[in-house]
Amino acid sequence: MSTLEQHAAAEAPYARIPTGIPGLDEVLLGGLPEHGVYLIKGGTGTGKTTLGLQFLLEGARRREKVLFVSLSQSNRMLERIAASHGWSLDGVHVHAITPHEILRQQATTQDVFVSDEVELVDIADRIRGVVEEVRPVRLVFDSLSFIEILATAPGRFERELASLVELLGTLEVTALFVLNQGGTGTTDMITDGAIELEHLAEDFAGVRYRLSVEKVRGSAFRGGHHDFEIIQGGLRVFPRLTLVPRGRFAEEQGGRTRAVFESDVPALDDLVGGGLTAGTSCLIRGPSGVGKSSLATRYAYAAATRGQRCVYFLFEEVRDTFLRRAAALSMDLRPFEASGEVRVRQVGGTSVLPGELATEIRSAVGWGAQVVVIDSLSGYYQSLPDERLLLSEIRDVIRYLSERGVLTLVTLAQRPDPVGVEAVPLEALNITESVDVTINLQYLEAGNALSKAISVIKRRDGDHEKGMRLLEIDGRGLTVGEVLPRFGGMTYEGAGAARAPVVHERDDGHGEDDRGSTIG
């Protein structure tokens, strides 16, 4: 339990009302405090009415009396909205006062009084009457904006709102008031909480939805923006990752020695300084096709053979293709999937919400994952609208997993590719300062052939070899050679390629072929 959750449990003697919206109750640390009135704010098309219906349907499922008072939708339209999500409104009391009905009444209203004031009194009385008649446990009022339009006299809207809130408090109703766009400061003061929904139009990625809880009076909640999607079945919220204070993992571990994850390729483990440590993060970078995914798979496979749980997130490769390729390289993960040590997740498609990965990561930790692989950051980048957003999200993911003692492996494609063509400029995505270990893979050109090389350029929690080793990937698995004895004549062409003679022989003059370790 996080510090925030402990605070919520200690300071909340009241009951909470589950919203029925996946992910939102986690943001609210259990739901909305009962007997409160809460604003649901947002622009047109952000899902306010859908959220309200989900809230009421959850109450109906719990056999509570629920009431939907609508000033913007007819009964038929509400039924159509519900049907589009596969819902039935059975058990939901609906009282609709449509704008068309109000306009018809205005045509016959006496002229002694200002017509909108007369209609406002009539509407307010009808609302109070139906609430007192039904006496619901949950209420959704959609929307306050229409009342605000009718209340032309100064202070009239605020008086009617305060009167309704007082009635709901007397009847111990938990209510959601829908309000288009922002709203007034008065509504924020009178109500007990506010949740704002918004949609952001993104180039190439369509519309992205997010929400934020602005306040919940007397209660803790998870702040910041949380992504959500509107799908058949309603809203689904992806809560942000909750980060505990730095150093908490070290405190919880005390003097215990952290686990070391070996690759079971001795030469590779020697290169990185004995293996990768639990609670650290490792970036595997290099040009396309150099073996980043294969190296990450090697660590996942080795962990699985020791009974350690691993989750592998795929952003580019098709899941079945990945599993077949791993098997062809003597790293068959399919038996470990069947036995429960490994989970391979194909995340998203053409578009991935930033919070979607966070939700998957949280689920992986809850499952007990000890190794998490994100393959690749390049694919994640192409599904997001803004590289700054990606950097923020991936840093939170790395820290979250580190705090929970999980080994994190992240792959990143960097230019140039083998033939010098720049496919995607990903230099801005360099996250080396955020990770604990950086493994660099690159091509070596020798005559008319390309070889691969591996080196470690950074390790925060220990020492590592400073040299470069040859790398081969074939049906036997990964082969890591001895440290290259000389670098004379190398001409570097960026971060991914170097021109040099390929050296397999020892310098002792025996001319033996010493390729180091090979383990599939």
Image (cartoon, rainbow, N blue to C red):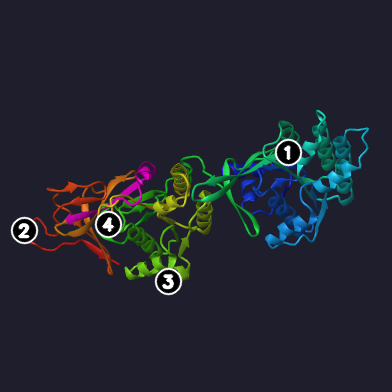
Q: Sequence-wise, which precedes: disc 2 or disc 1?
A: 1
In space, the residues marked 3 and 2 are separated at their CA atoms by 45 Å
Q: Which residue occupies the foreground of this view, 505 or 350?
A: 350
In space, the residues marked 1 and 3 are separated at their CA atoms by 53 Å
Callout 3 crowding tier (Cα within 10 Å): few <14, some 14–19, many ≥20:
few
Q: Looking at the image, can residue 1 be seen?
A: no
- Asked if labels 1 and 2 touch by Cβ distance under 8 angstroms, the answer is no
Residue 440 sits inside the magenta stretch: yes
Q: Which residue occupies the foreground of this view, 209 or 474?
A: 209
Q: Which residue is mark 4?
A: 268
Q: Which residue occupies the foreground of this view, 199 or 203?
A: 203
On residue 509, which mark appears?
2
- Asked if labels 2 and 4 touch by Cβ distance under 8 angstroms, the answer is no
Q: Sequence-wise, which precedes: disc 4 or disc 2?
A: 4
What type is the residue that disc 4 sits on? Answer: Leu
What type is the residue that disc 2 sits on? Answer: Gly
Dot 3: element: helix
Callout 4 crowding tier (Cα within 10 Å): few <14, some 14–19, many ≥20:
many
Closer to viewer: mark 2 or mark 1: 1
- Quadrant (top left/top right/bottom left/bottom right) for the C terminus: bottom left
What type is the residue that disc 3 sits on? Answer: Pro
Q: Which residue is mark 1?
A: 192
Dot 2: element: loop
On residue 140, which mark appears?
none
**Which residue sits at x=48%, y=58%?**
349
Q: Sequence-wise, which precedes: disc 1 or disc 3?
A: 1
Q: Sequence-wise, which precedes: disc 4 or disc 1?
A: 1
